[in-house]
Amino acid sequence: MKISKIEVFPLTLPMKQNFFISGGKVGDLGQGAPHVYVKITDDEGAEGWGEARPSHRWSYETLESVTTTIEHYLKPVLLGESVRDLNRIHRLMDRSIAAGFSKGMPIAKAAVDMAIHDLLAKHHGTHLPGLWMGTFKDTIRLSYLISTNDPDQACKKAREAKENGYLAIDVKIGLNPKLDVQILEAVKQAAPELYFRADANQAYTLTEAVRLSREMERIGVDVFEQPLKANDLTGHAELRRKTGIPIALDESIWSAGDLIQAIRTEACDMVVIKVTKTGGLKEARLCGEIAKEANLGLLGGGLTESTLGLTASAHLFNYLDLQIPVDLNGPFFLADDPAADGLQVRNGTVHLSGREGIGCTIAEEKIQKYAFKRE
């Protein structure tokens, strides 16, 4: 099983609603959202699919940089390599695109890693958990994501989450810091029994985060996610000493090495596992296992991936036995995508098919329909 072909498909997928984080808009109702699909074919004709979801307001990678990185730097060193040697594939990718502060171009590498996992599992005639000697689980619970700077709208969405069977809520804060407390209060009042995750996406200074965390303690927020800049581990450690709210790190952890530094500096109580930010399933699984051994809490997250990336992430989170409903928010925002068969979402629960590989069938006519067109 050698890699004979790597194809890259930059896409713009349609959105059902706008999506904002503290850094700005990451999905546009009118313009759609950038995604990159990768198809890897081996010398026996078998195919594996992977996905990257770049967002230039969340990280430095863009649709254009992911596409050119795979085409011009990763593809040339991987053609002819054995599909079975995943460690060598990652060594070659990391040698071709070196690390900066952390892993270099992880979102681009994640699409390749995901496609290799899909191909390997299909070759072995098993689903993704079977590749890791794990047990297939057919469901996973979702957290309901709220992204608005309108307290009334936040209250309405929290009620919808409760009425539709969700057990957790993830609220984006920092969109308008003056309204953060009102939004958090509105959500808690509307759905007091739901697990409450407040995600700042690096919006605050230490002083602001300390002040807000005290309000969160009063309101009853369960976890404060990524309040400070990604590289400010000492600031997060200081915040932990000044608040009773558990602190979770997301953008601070792009690799197992980053996680170890966070553990050494006592910078967090919980870790957000995301497949795409860590360069794929291989490193995300390692991060999850290290965090569990360090007795840290685990949260599952995504980057508004389509059905393909969501299904792969759901399998990993089940393998890691995540207990808190996960923030895989693609279904809340994407109107359509090229992947089918992998899952269905009903009443806050993802139902997984258990088909071979990741479990998705790719409609290549939709690959053409949603192909990125430069204006």
Image: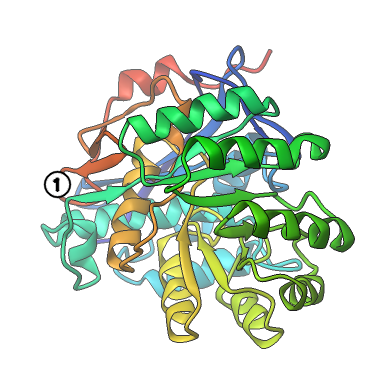
The C terminus lies in quadrant: top right
Q: Is residue 188 above or below residue 127?
A: above
* Residue in the foreground of this view, choosing between 139 and 174: 174
Which residue lies at the image location 21% right of the left edge and 47% below the top edge? 46
Name the image colouring.
rainbow
Quarter of image, res 332: top left
Residue 82, picture quadrant: bottom left
Mark 1 highlights which residue? 355
Which element type, helix, strand or loop, lies under badge 1?
loop
**Relative height, residue 133 to residue 192 (above, below):** below
Going by the numbered disc 1, the residue's amino acid type is Arg
| Residue 228 pos. (x, y %) | 78, 59
Determine whether, in the image, residue 159 is placed left or right of residue 260: left
x 19%, y 73%: residue: 133
Query: Horizontal and vertical percent for residue 248?
Result: 60, 65
Q: Residues within 10 Å of mark 1 (few under 14, many from 20)?
A: some
Q: Give left or right: position of 9 versus 4.
A: right
- Residue 330 percent location from the top left of the image: 44, 34
